[in-house]
Image (cartoon, rainbow, N blue to C red):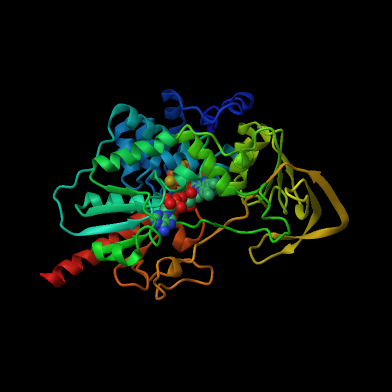
């Protein structure tokens, strides 16, 4: 170990941009065994590992790195899986530069230990070797839980409770499970078979999936509540923020999630993407600077767009999206127009051109980032065939949808929970984006694991009261 000064930092190879633009496959290649071992040996084995402190799951990173360095891959996998339900997914899509790797002490001067890639490597190996099997409970319990939403929060909670023997039922409005891991995040970041093999593992473990059930529409919340001893709401946030520009409802102005969801559905159902939602042959403008915007521009490139522009009101340094994703997008041919805001759409039936106002950065706003102000007279007109808006997400009005006016929500519409993660309705818990607001898969997993502990404690108390 401690070889960071003699072994340079090395990430898995990226496929050349010219090749990866032509398909929807993942862009990173797998570490070779020897390389994973060498990269793990770079770790200092810190007494107080900041990488672990800043991982939302507090993964025991130094230990799995040591096991990998020693060639003990099964131990490395067991260690990674003891705190994380989906290590192979987090290894692929966590913004490591903001979490574990961004806080690795070797980061400055030598380059962080490539933690995410090694986490992915050991878990992919575990799948290859058949070490990942159904999680069967030692004994069955009669009590049952209903979970609304089969995204990472709902699934992580489901595993924790099923392992303890509870009867776990997941309800989701989509026909396939996985939440945004399946429907939002593109295949070139997270191959869909990686999610579906987890769903199969859950099914084999006795977790019951009820897909295509929209709570509040096809089944009432009250009916569901009557069927289970405890409920978890893990419905995520899906309502797209608007632009507030005249013309934003024209048919060629498309919401990011509609675009990505259709596209992902096209991949796992091998179906045609609706023409309105396809970027093929079009000049595309994506508005926004977060990771969703990056997913849209890179999907548009792969669909065969003629030209793809990303318009963002701040500069590159101040954008919320991961710098790694921006670099990937630039390599794939996306044009970034920093410090730019769309101010006017032109066109009768469809938007045909957009006025884009140039901005300069002023004093920091409440978020601590410089706030953009317009530069008078600097407006450019750009021709477009399709506009994709990626300006963030808000929760649906759940008290109305669920016909439960007592369900307490914050001003932003997220669910309010107490210290036990219980909502204002007795025995109804909540976790993931619907509580935090739009966040990350790793936080949803952490919340799912936490809420499962509280729900099991609640059910234990109910059982004792009944006895
Ligand atoms: P979700 O994953 O949203 O799952 C909620 C589930 O609830 C869905 O399946 C939905 O169908 C279901 N549901 C909702 N309402 C109902 C209802 N009434 N009845 C039945 N079912 C219902 N995070 C990262 O860490 N890395 C990334 O690279 C990344 N990329 C992203 C890219 C995009 C385009 C988007 C939109 C998000 C991305 N995220 C990323 C964020 C991440 O996907 C979310 O933070 C995470 O999935 C939230 O998990 P969740 O379980 O709370 O909700
Ligand atoms: Fe890093 Fe995410 Fe893995 Fe934690 S779960 S160690 S933050 S990649
Ligand atoms: Fe290893 Fe970096 Fe974590 Fe220290 S902070 S234990 S060097 S990965």
Image-based side of 162 in relation to 23, left or right:
left
| View extreme (bottom): residue | 406
Total tally of numbered discs in the picture: 0
Say if residue 331 shows up in the picture: yes
124 sits to left or right of 374: left
* Residue pictured at 39% horizontal, 41% vertical: 87
Residue displayed at 33% across by 31% down: 127
- In front here: 1 or 151? 151
Residue at x 35% of width, y 64% of height: 221
Quadrant the N terminus occupies: top left
Vertically, is 139 above or below 13? below
Pinpoint residue 274: horizontal percent, then vertical percent.
57, 39
Residue at x 30% of width, y 62% of height? 224
Estimate the x, y position of residue 59 in percent, counting from the top left. 38, 47
Quarter placement of the C terminus:
bottom left
Instruction: Decide if residue 42 is in sight here.
Output: no
In the rendered image, the vertical position of residue 409 relative to residue 346, given as above or below: below
The residue most toward the left is 467
Residue 83 in picture, x, y percent from top left = 34, 48
Instruction: Quadrant for residue 418, please give it.
Output: bottom left
User: Toward the viewer: 303 or 273?
Assistant: 273
Above or below, 435 relative to 132: below
Coordinates of residue 222 in the picture (x, y in percent): 32, 67
């Amino acid at each position: 170990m401690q070889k960071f000064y003699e072994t340079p930092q090395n990430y898995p190879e990226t496929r050349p941009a010219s090749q990866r633009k032509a398909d929807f496959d993942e862009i990173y290649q797998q570490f070779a065994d020897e390389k994973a071992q060498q990269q793990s040996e770079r770790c200092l084995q810190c007494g107080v590992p900041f990488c672990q402190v800043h991982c939302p799951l507090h993964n025991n990173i130094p230990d799995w790195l040591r096991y990998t360095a020693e060639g003990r891959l099964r131990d490395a996998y067991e260690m990674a899986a003891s705190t994380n339900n989906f290590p192979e997914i987090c290894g692929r899509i966590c913004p490591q530069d903001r979490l574990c790797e961004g806080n690795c002490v070797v980061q400055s001067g030598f380059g962080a230990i490539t933690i995410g890639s090694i986490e992915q490597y050991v878990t992919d190996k575990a799948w290859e070797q058949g070490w990942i099997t159904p999680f069967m409970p030692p004994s069955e319990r009669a009590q049952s839980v209903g979970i609304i939403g089969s995204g990472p929060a709902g699934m992580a909670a489901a595993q924790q409770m099923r392992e303890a023997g509870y009867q776990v039922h997941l309800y989701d409005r989509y026909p396939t499970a996985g939440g945004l891991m399946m429907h939002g995040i593109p295949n070139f970041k997270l191959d869909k078979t990686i999610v579906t093999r987890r769903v199969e593992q859950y099914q084999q473990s006795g977790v019951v999936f009820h897909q295509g059930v929209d709570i509040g529409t096809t089944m009432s919340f009250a009916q569901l509540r009557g069927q289970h001893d405890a409920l978890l709401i893990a419905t995520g946030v899906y309502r797209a923020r608007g632009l507030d520009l005249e013309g934003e409802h024209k048919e060629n102005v498309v919401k990011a999630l509609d675009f990505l969801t259709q596209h992902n559905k096209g991949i796992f159902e091998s179906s045609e993407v609706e023409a309105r939602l396809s970027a093929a042959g079009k000049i595309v403008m994506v508005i926004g600077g977060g990771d969703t915007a990056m997913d849209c521009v890179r999907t548009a490139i792969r669909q065969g767009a003629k030209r793809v522009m990303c318009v963002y009101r701040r500069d590159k340094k101040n954008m919320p999206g991961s710098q790694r994703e921006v670099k990937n997008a630039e390599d794939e041919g996306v044009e970034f127009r920093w410090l730019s805001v769309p101010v006017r759409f032109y066109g009768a039936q469809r938007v045909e051109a957009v006025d884009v106002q140039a901005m300069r950065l002023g004093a920091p706003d409440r978020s601590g980032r410089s706030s953009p102000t317009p530069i008078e007279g600097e407006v450019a007109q750009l021709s477009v065939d399709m506009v994709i808006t990626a300006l963030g997400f808000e929760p649906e009005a759940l008290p109305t949808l669920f016909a439960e006016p007592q369900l307490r929500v914050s001003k932003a519409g997220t669910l309010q929970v107490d210290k036990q993660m219980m909502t204002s309705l007795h025995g109804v818990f909540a976790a993931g984006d619907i509580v935090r607001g739009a966040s990350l898969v790793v936080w949803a997993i952490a919340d799912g694991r936490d809420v499962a502990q509280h729900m099991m404690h609640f059910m234990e108390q109910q059982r004792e009261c009944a006895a």
